[in-house]
Image (cartoon, rainbow, N blue to C red):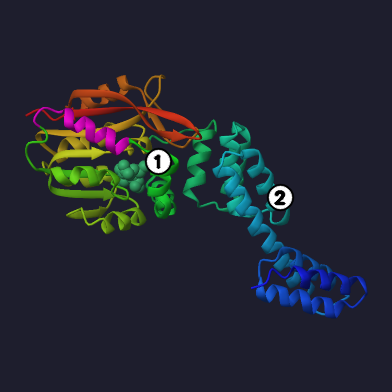
Amino acid sequence: MSDNTETFVRATELAREGKSDEAAALYRGILAEQPKHLAAAKALADLVESGAARGEAAAARKAAVDIETESTYSVAKTAQKHGRFDVAIRCYKKILDFDPEHGDAVWGLAEACYANDQVAEALRWYQSYSEIYPDDPESKHMVAALGDGPKPSRASDDYVRETFDNFAGDFDRQLLEDLEYRVPKLIHALFGEIPGATTEKLDILDAGCGTGLSGIDFKPHAATLTGVDLSPEMLKRAKERKIYDELLELELADFMRGRPAAFELIVAADVFCYIGDLSETFDAAFIALKPGGHLLFSVEAQSKRGFSLTGSGRYAHKPAYVGKAAKAAGFCEILARNGTLRMEYGEPVEGYLTALQKPV
Ligand SMILES: C[S@@+](CC[C@H](N)C(=O)[O-])C[C@H]1O[C@@H](n2cnc3c(N)ncnc32)[C@H](O)[C@@H]1O
């Protein structure tokens, strides 16, 4: 395929000479070969709109705007990925000049503003997204996270499902390559510190199993490996790994309450950041564990008391709160470690890894 440069130059000359229909025919030829050729689409739209060349003006202009929007969006995403949030913000705003209700650009603006420390602006864009899509659970959650209003005590099932269904296709690559995700390895190392833990095969629950990244490390220790998660798209990827005996699409506390004394080990890697108040989850895990069984999990760290829903949309917990809630559910805390869980916008996210035991 040629790059059509000569044809484009020729078409521009013809247009200048007033031979508009001939010029338009050349622009259409270029677009037939290169449908994303922005300059040709714009030039054609100008000719048709001015009445100089035959054609439907609105359709020609829309075609040009669509190409420009798509390429601007792609520049914005690339800039955002490389930390050039200022460039991303400019590109998203340009898209909104063409299409004020372009949902992906509004969402992109919210994320890029947050990453660029423009929290009030980010909130405003999440609110705009919520106005365009009033039933959207993700923007509702982010408005709660960044705004002054009441905060939910855990992320709603709809939020979790929608977020991870959208994320599933790129989850492993983003977590492992871009975010240097370390939680499965840290939890597995913590497991290795429990005296005698690795001597027998265990009935293991991977709670909030996602695509199965933590299941991989625990499979060799499993007599049975069960995964539970709210997101069908994440579960689809977990199934492809062929390491789970059972995979269930359920809220994890609901599931655990229905399986009394079924597991010797429950692992929740990077899951409690979607649950603020851990009491219900700990109670359910206590029910699902056999006496002497262990619950291993990570939380993101905070120095404030209790737990908070942070501007990232995830919850952070103070270790004292975790210890108190675990004790109230009947657990003994046997191990606690600090660790870097992953990166976020180039900064390490610090957290705690904890092992609880249900008394024998
Ligand atoms: C960050 S991912 C971690 C996945 C996996 N544990 C890993 O380490 O790769 C969090 C997962 O927890 C799931 N999740 C969050 N809250 C949940 C809940 N209340 N019940 C079931 N699954 C939940 C999400 O759908 C998502 O797949």
Q: Quadrant of the C terminus?
A: top left
Residue plotted at (67% across, 63% down): 66
Left or right of residue 346, residue 186 in this image: left
Q: Is residue 254 above or below residue 119?
A: below
Q: Residues within 10 Å of mark 2 (few under 14, many from 20)?
A: some
Residue 94 is tagged as 2
**Looking at the picture, which amino acid does disc 1 mark?**
Ala
Label tally: 2
Q: Secondary structure at mark 1?
A: loop
Q: Nearer the viewer, residue 75 or 114?
A: 75
Which is more foreground, mark 2 or mark 1? 2
Q: Earlier in the sequence, mark 2 or mark 1?
A: 2
The spot of residue 96 in percent (x, y) is 69, 51
The residue carrying mark 1 is 155
Q: Alpha-carbon distance for marks 2 and 1?
A: 32 Å
Q: Which residues are magenta?
A: 183-196
Q: Residue at x 52, y 33 (%)?
A: 149
Ligand 1 within 8 Å of disc 2? The answer is no
The verdict on residue 194 being magenta is yes
Q: In percent of the image, x 59 and y 32: which residue is there?
A: 119
